[in-house]
Image: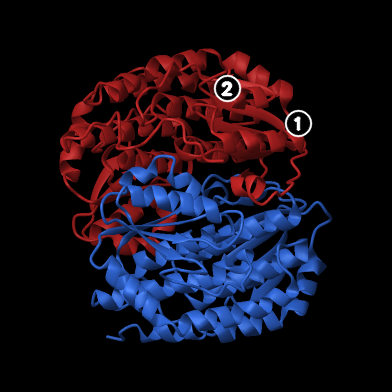
Chain colours: A red, B blue
Amino acid sequence: VSSGLLMADEMDEQPDVLGRLVARRDELLAQVRAILPTAPVRVAIVARGSSDHAAVYGRYLLEFAAGTPVALTAPSLQTRYGVQTDYRGHLAIAVSQSGRTPEIVAVLEQMRAHGAATIAITNDGDSPLADAADLAIDLRAGEERAIPATKTVTAQLAAFALVAEAVGAVPWTPVDWATVVPAVDTVLHDPGAATRAAAAIGDATGAIVIARGFLFAAALETALKLKETTGLLAEGYSAADFRHGPIAVVDAGLPVLAISAAGPCAADVAETADEIRARGGHVLTVREADADLPFDAAVPEALAAIPATVRGQQLAHALALHRGLDPDAPAGLSKVTATR
Amino acid sequence: VSSGLLMADEMDEQPDVLGRLVARRDELLAQVRAILPTAPVRVAIVARGSSDHAAVYGRYLLEFAAGTPVALTAPSLQTRYGVQTDYRGHLAIAVSQSGRTPEIVAVLEQMRAHGAATIAITNDGDSPLADAADLAIDLRAGEERAIPATKTVTAQLAAFALVAEAVGAVPWTPVDWATVVPAVDTVLHDPGAATRAAAAIGDATGAIVIARGFLFAAALETALKLKETTGLLAEGYSAADFRHGPIAVVDAGLPVLAISAAGPCAADVAETADEIRARGGHVLTVREADADLPFDAAVPEALAAIPATVRGQQLAHALALHRGLDPDAPAGLSKVTATR
């Protein structure tokens, strides 16, 4: 039993991986700008699993930057129903850690064949997905061996933020990047908060993770990490959507992680959290100040998904250890999922 | 205690509601065509809760029909971050049972102000949402009093199918509509299957619902109905996405509903169901033949989301009664959710 050493090591590599990626900022922005279609740029994104959560983050940032609606693809339309979607004028972005999920490669190839300028965000610059794209953004995160993806996910988030900068105006400035690596480092040096939160979740059979806006992706990814490492029935929700019915699942003691950062959505998350507490749910906060799982307030809201996601990884890892499970190797999962 | 009579009555009204809506087909198609932007039509959809599941169904049908990427909006971009998304050339569709959820009205108003031709799909033709649209499709389903939406949801599904017909080629013919109402009627006259499935789920604390493609929305909606009526931690998943990590939650006895219909995605759902069985999960099938919860094989796959969704409602209702709960009035939920 590896006792989660692979996942822990890979989590710990994140400051270095992110630092190296951000150091390539000028080069990456130039590469993206070189393939951008004529304005107005329209964006479509294809991904699965953790990469799809990075895609959700990218969906928010790219609509902000491009000022046009962003589409998250439904791969079955291309791979199962044979729809010939017109992607002229589109920037199409495919995200896959391995670059080897057949359906993602197939969809990106179709997007390119139907007119899109294409980017592959992958951790293998020699993968079929990289080969299929006009531009491959190789995350260079090093081989990821633990089943739960960690360093490649935060690298994907950062890559989307850099692509958004290349496309248009974003709600942060270049100097803000200097806050991200230290914030991730600070989280990683504070494992006690995650250990305490894991003890509070204990042997619960389910959990909910809420967030909104630029942090929504961190809620989806935290729920998936909890599923993968512990089998916990954890579901991620928009704090707004959660009140449209799903809040009925909250009963006494249900653990609910509430992720937010100072910004236009913080009050929505706080309001939903209050409703959850009123129903007896056990809310654990992930935010800058006065939080169960804090992160550095210096990071702007639009980049806070990165340290918040690391908090979620840390909690998933800690909860697995708390339950005597091996977070590196969830029962029966393999690293490349061969959906077509 | 109403013992679920409101929800049961409203479920039973579905053949009539759907029949009346389909009878308006020619008129509705003409109304939609009268406001369509010049081709290529681009589509964006905004909704929350059950209506958002109808939106997911519409997302598949409309990309099929329009041959362009369809975007499901992230309302916070408009209502919280002030993004001025350019909707010129777009058909924007907002879906809300009440037509009174403030954020949905606000987003549709912005879509219209930024160039979209707008449709409101609502059950109140005098609602603020109807007023904000170029075309209001009034579902005329009659007042819905039970908290879990049923007849308005299947009417929304049918409305999206009719809008798709107005936009372009669809994978069914007009005569196929004649199969839908009888299929829903047959499901409603077979409550025993749902009672048996509810007994099989028993006191499980969680469940998963999988489907793919045109039936994916039925999985999302079935999971939400189970949440609303029983508090069960039920999550809907694409059968393809479920294998990218989340399958780790499956352990001995976990109830998994597998929804499919004859067509290009049936094998994917069957393959994922086999993996789930191999992990000890208890798979209950929702499909045409040899199923725990069958529906009529005469309905084409692209319209089968309608009877499949009714099966999900029926199961949610039966499971609530099995647990001694009142499906009409889940604890603390109200009919109109005032997210902004």
SS of the residue under disc 2: loop
Identity of the residue furthest to the right in this view: B38
Residue B112: percent from left, percent from top? 70, 58
| B281 relative to B131 in the view: left or right | left
The quarter of the rendered structure image containing the N terminus of chain A is top left
- B76 over A313 or under it: above or below: below
The answer to whether residue B113 of the structure is visible from this angle is no
Q: Name the foreground residue: A289 vs B147.
A: B147
**For the point 23% across and 31% down, which residue is it?**
A326
Q: Are marks 2 and 1 on the same chain?
A: yes
Among the two numbered marks 2 and 1 on one chain, the one whose residue lies closer to the N terminus: 1
Q: Chain of mark 2?
A: A
Which amino acid type is marked by label 2?
Answer: Ser
Residue B239: percent from left, percent from top? 48, 50
Q: Name the foreground residue: A91 vs A171.
A: A91
The quarter of the rendered structure image containing the C terminus of chain A is top right
- A21 over B322 or under it: above or below: above
Residue B298: percent from left, percent from top? 62, 74
Q: Name the foreground residue: A5 vs A218.
A: A5
Name the mark nearer the viewer: 2 or 1. 2
Q: Residues within 10 Å of mark 1 (few under 14, many from 20)?
A: some
The answer to whether residue B119 of the structure is visible from this angle is yes
Residue indicated by mark 2: A127
Residue A37: mark in rendering? 1
**For the point 71% across and 81% down, which residue is it?**
B24
